[in-house]
């Protein structure tokens, strides 16, 4: 018997991407399986005894770790908090931990407690670690920056997964992107030259999924699926043939650059292969900003016309948008809202600009003295702190960003975009979602949950109009409604959390003003101040308890910071305002 190894995938926090509040409609725990980790599993020695724990669908205990010889994990930036818990468990259990993935690759110098780092791409960095581990001479860090030929990458170990816990499956066709946007870390992680698997490899992976009982959504996780168009044109007819022979068991979706819109033949091939959605990085409707950010392919295009051209082929367009660029003016927020509505993009992922480690943006801001800290969070639904000094006033930027989210995910606006998209798209037998048990379950839960929601009128108006427009696309209509529930829930929770933080800030200032008057007055005034402070803290603590569990931790951290500030407002030794040294019992 070989090594007993445990592969642990960190938890994904609730974000716009996570679809956490849509998953219960489907009876699933996670949107997608940990494709990177099960690909690594396929590269481990065949005599190793492997077990996978995905913390998005199950919990882990110290006993799980004590039962194995080695733990391996892979994490993205957004999974940092869960990753740190895995590290702590391994330390407590006294078991060695191997870590890789985007987060360790970008930030391993800042990470404590990991025994072995396998950074970059596993095809070149994992074998030397395995050899050294076998010989009892493993090093702390393995990092070969070379780009491997992924035609030799083995198929993922799909057999390690519990498929019923996931909303869809995933596979990877290519790595790398030919573009070089200043804010993007993809080219830093995977290079400029897109490398692809062979059509035979992809069909073999689809065979494994099909034989394992997977059906429905299949995400091709490439950051730019059309980066190597010559190879993609070879692949798509093979996928179309495979799908047709099996009556299209999968509906595919992926990510691509917006210049897809200029290639009608390629879009037709994608539709014939069963693609029904593509995510594109639009970022901003401002041409000067696109040029400055290195997004030249978008600056040369008519953005609205490009989106509509893709939609007209029967492909839904989801898109990413960013605010906070140096060139952004005060009207950018209204322009983003207006563009998203005109483009009829239901899934609009709007984010604050972040200087990610390793990017040209990070390097430039550091050289300009504007970098505040290295971002290792990646979650803008719980923390809107900027890691750089923006040209726009930071408070104006955050307020504008929150307004964009509030407007874009106002139910009436969201459903209006969905209906306009349905009008534009022509249903194809190859790309329309088939109605299976999971879709029927989602439809039933949607009717029950969303009928008795805050937005019931907007929901039913959308559903009835949509069914009248495109009755064949009922699965798409329900899917967008369920996604909407997720977007509405997370937006409302985010904005409530931000209002709570703002109120704490105002209350702190009010307390300082009251305390100044109390110090200048008499003991009675001071007694009034103490009573007011106690009452305010009690109310704030009670409000924390009413937050959604996913946001309660962030609310409590804000409250504890507020309480600490309040308790340091007086220095007992001289009775004047200060910032340190106060015993919390001194004034209450």
Image (cartoon, rainbow, N blue to C red):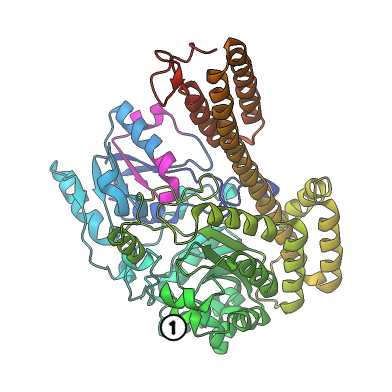
Q: Position of residue 116 (x, y in %)?
A: 24, 44
Residue 1 visible somewhere in the drawing: no
Q: Nearer the viewer, residue 209 or 278?
A: 278
Looking at the image, is 80 positioned above or below residue 421? above
Tag 1 residue: 229
Answer above or below: position of 223 versus 45: below
Q: Which residues are magenta?
A: 60-83
Quarter-of-image position of residue 420: bottom right
Residue 188 located left or right of residue 444:
left
Kindly tell me whether residue 579 is visible in this rendering.
Answer: yes
How crowded is the residue under tag 1: few (<14 C-alpha within 10 Å), some, or many (20+)? few
For residue 181, what is the image quadrant?
Answer: bottom left
Q: Where the N terminus falls, by quadrant?
A: top left
| Quarter in which the C terminus is drawn | top right
Front in this rendered view, residue 483 or 134: 483
Q: Is residue 439 left or right of residue 400?
A: right
Q: Is residue 74 located in the magenta-colored stretch of the structure? A: yes
User: Residue 442: x percent and y percent?
Assistant: 73, 52
Q: Secondary structure at mark 1?
A: helix
Where residue 429 appears, x then y in whole percent?
Answer: 70, 76
């Amino acid at each position: 018997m070989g090594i007993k190894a445990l592969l642990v995938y960190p938890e994904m926090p609730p974000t716009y991407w996570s679809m956490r509040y849509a998953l219960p409609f489907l009876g699933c725990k996670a949107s997608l399986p940990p494709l990177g980790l099960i690909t690594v599993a396929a590269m481990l020695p065949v005599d190793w005894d492997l077990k996978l724990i995905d913390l998005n669908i199950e919990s882990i205990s110290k006993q799980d770790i004590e039962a194995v010889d080695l733990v391996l994990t892979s994490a993205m930036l957004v999974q940092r908090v869960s990753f740190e818990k895995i590290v702590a468990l391994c330390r407590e259990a006294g078991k060695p931990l191997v870590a890789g993935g985007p987060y360790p690759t970008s930030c391993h110098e800042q990470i404590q407690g990991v025994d072995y780092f396998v950074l970059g791409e596993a095809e070149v960095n994992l074998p030397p670690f395995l050899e050294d581990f076998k010989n009892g001479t493993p090093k702390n860090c393995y990092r070969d920056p070379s780009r491997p030929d992924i035609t030799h990458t083995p198929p993922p170990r799909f057999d390690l997964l519990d498929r019923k816990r996931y909303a869809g499956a995933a596979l990877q066709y290519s790595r790398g992107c030919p573009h070089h946007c200043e804010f993007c870390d993809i080219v830093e992680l995977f290079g400029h030259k897109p490398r692809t698997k062979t059509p035979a490899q992809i069909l073999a992976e689809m065979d494994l999924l099909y034989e394992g009982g997977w059906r429905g959504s299949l995400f091709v996780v490439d950051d730019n699926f059309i980066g190597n168009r010559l190879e993609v044109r070879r692949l798509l007819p093979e996928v179309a043939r495979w799908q047709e022979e099996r009556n299209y068991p999968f509906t595919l979706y992926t990510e691509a650059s917006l210049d897809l819109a200029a290639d009608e033949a390629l879009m037709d091939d994608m539709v014939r292969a069963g693609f029904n959605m593509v995510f594109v990085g639009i970022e901003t409707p401002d041409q000067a900003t696109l040029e400055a950010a290195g997004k030249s392919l978008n600056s040369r295009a008519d953005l609205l016309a490009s989106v509509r051209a893709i939609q007209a082929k029967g492909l839904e367009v989801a898109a990413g948008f960013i605010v906070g660029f140096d060139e952004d003016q005060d009207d950018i927020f209204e322009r983003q809202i207006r563009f998203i509505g005109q483009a009829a993009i239901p899934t609009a992922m709007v984010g604050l600009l972040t200087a990610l480690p390793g990017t040209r943006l990070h390097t430039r801001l550091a050289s300009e003295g504007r970098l505040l800290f290295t971002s290792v969070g990646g979650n803008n639904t719980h923390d809107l702190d900027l890691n750089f000094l923006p040209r726009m006033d930071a408070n104006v930027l955050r307020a504008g960003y929150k307004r964009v989210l509030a407007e874009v995910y106002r139910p009436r606006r969201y459903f209006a975009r969905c209906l306009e998209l349905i009008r534009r798209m022509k249903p194809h037998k190859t790309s329309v979602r088939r109605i299976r048990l999971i879709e029927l379950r989602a439809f039933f839960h949607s009717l029950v949950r969303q009928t008795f929601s805050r937005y019931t009128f907007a929901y039913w108006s959308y559903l009835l109009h949509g069914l009248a427009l495109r009755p064949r696309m009922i699965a798409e209509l329900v899917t967008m409604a369920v996604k909407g529930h997720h977007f509405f829930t997370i937006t409302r929770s985010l904005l409530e959390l931000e209002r709570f933080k703002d109120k704490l800030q105002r209350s702190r200032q009010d307390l300082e003003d009251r305390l100044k008057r109390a110090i200048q007055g008499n003991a009675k005034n001071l007694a009034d101040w103490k009573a007011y402070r106690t009452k305010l803290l009690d109310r704030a603590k009670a409000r924390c308890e009413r937050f959604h569990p996913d946001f309660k931790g962030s609310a409590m951290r804000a409250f504890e910071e507020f309480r600490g500030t309040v308790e340091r407002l007086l220095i007992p030794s001289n009775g004047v305002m200060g910032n340190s040294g106060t015993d919390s019992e001194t004034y209450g």
